[in-house]
Each structure stands twice: as structure tokens, then as C-alpha cells.
Amino acid sequence: MEIGIGYPANIPGTPGTLLLDWARKADLGPFSSLGLIDRLVYPNYSPLIALAGAGAVTLRIRVMTTVLLAPLYNTGVLAKELASLDALTNGRLTVGLGIGSREDDFLAAPASFNNRGKRFDAQLAEMKRIWAGEPLSAEVGPIGPRPVQPGGPPILIGGRAPAAIQRVARYGDGFISGGGGPAAARQNYDIAQNAWREQGRPGQPRFVACSYYGLGPNALDRARETITRYYGPQYGGMIVQSLPTTPEAIKDTIRAFADTGADELILWPTNTDLDQVDRMADLVSAFVSPQ
């Protein structure tokens, strides 16, 4: 199982210079990917701009949206930006996509909230056509640039509802579990896998899981502050209850996700201390081959 690290561009108040230093450190470590979640009505950095910055100061590590809320965006613009990011990183982009659940994000975009699932289906099909170099319509020609990765960057579909997860078989290359424990992640992946087989697709969908962590002094208190601010006290409190904040707990978390058969685990940080990268690198090195 590969192990990636989250990019703290979603934590309010993070200096831009620290983000670039974080990316450089992660690139030198044992991590497979640098993952970043998405919000609109929140004091976070724009995910694609933040990942473009990371791509500019790294050479090896992949950049990944974990996940980007696709229905907030105009499809043609989004396809162009993702293709541009893939080209700028020389094919190091993985695109995790979902529909989102916070209505205020859609009010701010603005974008329709009630039909976001239907629009997401159309977006997925349309982006595939754009990345293949096809004209958008009889009136609109091709939208470039062409991605470095043939057919476009790999798409991972996130979601908890069976209907959402089944999109993996029709449009995606894999499933991404946006938080939650190993058992729930595996259960949802099984839905994606069954849909994949029913669709007659060869091989297996990729399985990427995500989990928060905290390390160092006052790790639990700092994690509680970050998680509660982002998710609210009720759901945030549930996440904090099982959040690993010691080296042994993090090792147990890694082993548990490895036992589910995950291909990759992204560990999201809950504070922006730069030593979080080094602390996590020391733990991860015992589980992965040298880069």
C-alpha cells in the first residue's frame, strides 16, 4: 500500500510560504501523493491553485484532490484547469471528485444544489471527451491543453451513497473514501467493485482511503480545534474520537487500512507545524519501499 500525506492548504491561516516548504519536504520523503480537500465557503486556499504551487516546487510526488467538489465548477473551465495542472506537473495529477453536501458552497458559487448529482454525471462524461481532444459540441471546438496522461488524469469518485459510488464503474478509475474508518471504507469500495464488474470493466478499480492524524505536543487539542471548525461540533466530535495522535495509533491505522486492501492511504494533517511531515515520514518509512 502506498501512503500519501495531506496538504494543509485547507487549514485557516496557513502561510503560503509554509505550504511550499511542506510540499518540498513531502517530495523528499516516502510519500506517494500530496492530497487536498475542497471547500468554497471557508478560509482555505483554492485547491487547484494550491496544488499548482506544490507541483512547481516538487519533482516526484503526485498531487491529488481528495476530493474536489466538481458541481461547484463550470465544466469546460474545470476540465481546462485540470488538464493544465496535469501538464504542469508532467502527469503527476490524480483527480478525486465528489458532489459535496454543504448548500452554502453552492449558494456562493453560484450553482444548483438540488440537481448536483445529475450534473456531476454529465460533467464526468464531458471532461473525458474534452481530455480526449474531441470538440465540445457542433458549435464549440476542442478545449486544450491536452493532458500529459493519455485520456486525462485518473479519476477517483468519492461518496457514501451507493448511487454515488456506482459512478466509479461508468466514469472513474477508482474509488476514494473521504474519511471514516477502515471498515466503512472497505464496505463502500465493495459497492464500487461490484458495479465495476457488472459494467464489464477489466481489472479492478483503484482503492484510495483517507484519514486524519495529529502528532507532537497538544496534538489532540489542536486536532479537535481544526476538525471542529471544519465539520462542526457534532460530526467533528465523532471524527476526533477515533483520530490517531500517537505514533503507535497511527501505525495501527496504517495497518488497518492496509488490511482492507487499499492501494493508497492519504493521511491528512490537523496542524501546520512543518515537523508534521518529518514525524510522519519516520513512521511511514517502515511501511513503504524507498522512493
Image (cartoon, helix red, strand yellow):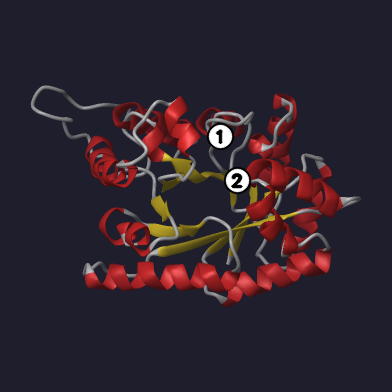
Looking at the figure, which quarter contains the N terminus?
A: bottom right
Q: Which residue is mark 1?
A: 51
Q: Which residue is mark 2?
A: 34
Query: Can residue 210 be seen in the rendering of this structure?
Result: yes
**Secondary structure beneath label 2:** strand
Residue 209, percent across and down?
A: 55, 61
Q: Nearer the viewer, residue 106 or 171?
A: 106
Q: Residue furthest bottom?
A: 259
238, above or below 44, in the image: below
State the image quarter where residue 85 is shown: top left
Residue 234, percent across and down?
A: 66, 53
Q: Nearer the viewer, residue 39 or 157?
A: 39
Residue under the point 37% across and 67% down: 192
Residue 177, percent across and down?
A: 51, 59
Looking at the figure, which quarter contains the C terminus?
A: bottom right
Q: Is residue 63 left or right of residue 190?
A: right
Amino acid type of the residue tagged 2 in the rendering: Leu
Q: Mark 2 and mark 1 in contact (Cβ < 8 Å)?
A: yes
Residue under the point 69% across and 49% down: 233
Residue under the point 53% across and 70% down: 184
Q: Residues within 10 Å of mark 2 (few under 14, many from 20)?
A: many
Amino acid type of the residue tagged 1 in the rendering: Leu
Q: Residue furthest front?
A: 234
Residue under the point 36% across and 57% down: 164
State the image quarter where residue 50 is shown: top right
